[in-house]
Amino acid sequence: MNTLEWAKNEIAIASKRERGNKPENEWDYGCACYDSALKAFESLLGDGHGGTSISFTKNILNRLIDRKPLTPIEDTEDMWNYAHDKKDGSKCYQCKRMSSLFKYVAKDGSVSYSDLNRCYCASKEKSSINWFNGFISSIYDEMYPITMPYMPNNKSDIIVRDELLTDRKNGDYDTIAILYIRRANGEKVEVDRYFKENDVSFTEISLEEYKERQKLHEERIRKETEK
């Protein structure tokens, strides 16, 4: 059995499991994805790829699927579209080649950048569920400022955090602990910074104050449980 025959057999097995008891002539989303994958694989084999070259081609394809550039982005005038003015008076521009990349020009002319896909948040208890948080992303950008030319990693960094709610009127949480960062290269960077909600955003607090708020959080849960 050659490589293509092996792939077709694997797709057939997976598609059969995906389809289950559905009729063969009924369209199935999962099976359609398997068929598309087989077409792409067959195309690569048809171009003579194998071994090293197919891995190299796969990396290129993965970056295109993830909408990541194939060459570094330069900060040239033709690279940006004006997006909007921020409340602090700075101007925000969006990169033409990478929609998640933004450039901020402050009133004093200083420039900073932010890539919305560069990092995600994860809960200490549920680290497999990731989401974007603007405030925590800004802390991350201070730690690891983007410089030009910029070439994003294949994978995003994960910021592991914990949250507390000391008072139900404050919504889902009013206290944040940024515990550590799991870098794309596998490195674990301890952060251990703590913040409480204010009228606008969050204010940094000490570990001692965080522990006091943790007691309030636990007391709130205890009272709600007893009701």
Image (spheres, rainbow, N blue to C red):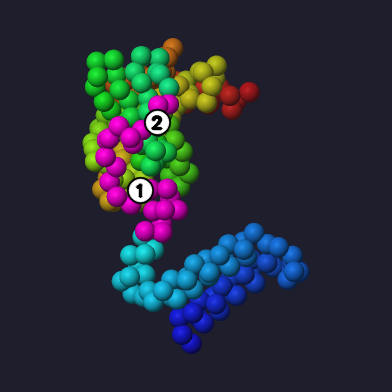
Say which residue label 1 marks: 69
Which amino acid, mark 1? Pro
Badge 2: residue crowd in 10 Å (few <14, some 14–19, many ≥20) = some
Kindly report which numbered mark, 1 or 2, lies closer to the viewer in this rendering: 2
Residue at the far bottom: name it: 1
Which amino acid, mark 2? Asn
Where is residue 187? Give x, y as percent: 26, 48
- Give the answer, above or below, for where 29 lies relative to 217: below
Left or right of 145 in this view: 157 = right
Left or right of 82 in this view: 140 = left
Say which residue label 2 marks: 81
Where is residue 178? Give x, y as percent: 34, 32
At 62% from the left and 63% from the top, the residue drawn is 32
Badge 1: residue crowd in 10 Å (few <14, some 14–19, many ≥20) = some
At 46% from the left and 85% from the top, the residue drawn is 2
Q: Nearer the viewer, residue 93 or 208?
A: 93
The answer to whether residue 29 is magenta is no
**Mark 2 and mark 1 in contact (Cβ < 8 Å)?**
no
The range drawn in magenta is 60-83
Q: Could you tell me which secondary element the residue under label 2 belongs to? A: strand
Residue 201 falls in image quadrant: top left
How far apart marks 1 and 2 lie (CA) works out to 17 Å
Screen quadrant of the C terminus:
top right
At 36% from the left and 33% from the top, the residue drawn is 80
The answer to whether residue 81 is magenta is yes
At 65% from the left and 72% from the top, the residue drawn is 16
Q: Could you tell me which secondary element the residue under label 1 belongs to? A: loop
